[in-house]
Amino acid sequence: DRIYAAPGLRGDLWLAAFDGLYRAVPSPDAHAVSVPFTQLPGVDEIHAFGFGKAAPGKSYPALYLVGTVRGQPGIFRSTDKAQTWARINDDQHQWGLVLQIAGDPRIFGRVYVGTHGRGVFYGDPAKR
């Protein structure tokens, strides 16, 4: 389990736990001592979590995770604060145990994946 601060956003915290994803949104009260974490639906299991550049037309950073979403294992991206997830790998592109993931902070959609013993890979969105 690990806590992540959303880049550039004061008090916006994410907790990537093995059993799900949780978020604590900052309180409008600047003097609040603690903010509760709320579990977000759909994420069953997490092995890695990270942020990347926001999608075109969006202001919030893209979210990336390695794990299981709604029963489907894979690598996922969300562009709407974890309300929905899109699988960004396929059954032909899996690298065993993946414990690190980070989106590029300057290029939307580029993602870096650190594998356990197979190196570091990066990918860009497929041209359609």
Image (tube, grey):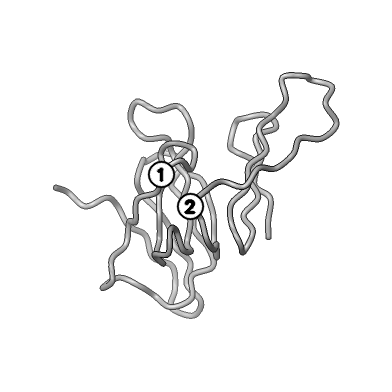
Instruction: Please state which amino acid type lies under the numbered disc 1.
Output: Thr
Figure check: 67 above or below 4: below
Mark 1 residue element:
loop
* Residue 84: assigned label: 1
Residue at image coords 43%, 38%:
53
Where in the figure is residue 88, as x and y percent of width and height? 32, 56
Which quadrant of the structure image shows residue 57? top left
From the viewer's side, name the closer residue of 68 and 1: 68
Where in the figure is residue 126, as x and y percent of width and height? 21, 52
Instruction: Please state which amino acid type lies under the numbered disc 2.
Output: Gly
Residue at image coords 72%, 25%:
27
The quadrant of the picture occupied by the N terminus is bottom right
Near mark 1 (Cα within 10 A), the count class, few <14, some 14-19 or many ≥20, is some
How many numbered discs, if any?
2
Real-space Cα separation, disc 2 to disc 1, in angstroms:
8 Å
Where in the figure is residue 49, as x and y percent of width and height? 54, 55
Q: Earlier in the sequence, mark 2 or mark 1?
A: 2
From the viewer's side, name the closer residue of 103 and 90: 90
From the viewer's side, name the closer residue of 57 and 45: 45
Residue at image coords 43%, 58%:
70
* Residue 93: assigned label: none
Near mark 2 (Cα within 10 A), the count class, few <14, some 14-19 or many ≥20, is some
Q: Is residue 18 left or right of residue 67?
A: right
Q: Is residue 126 left or right of residue 89?
A: left
Where in the figure is residue 76, as x and y percent of width and height? 40, 55
Mark 2 residue element:
loop
Discs 2, 1 touching: Cβ within 8 Å = yes
Residue position marked by numbered label 2 in the rendering: 42
Q: Is residue 117 left or right of residue 9?
A: left
* Residue ranking furthest to the left: 128
Figure check: 97 above or below 123: below
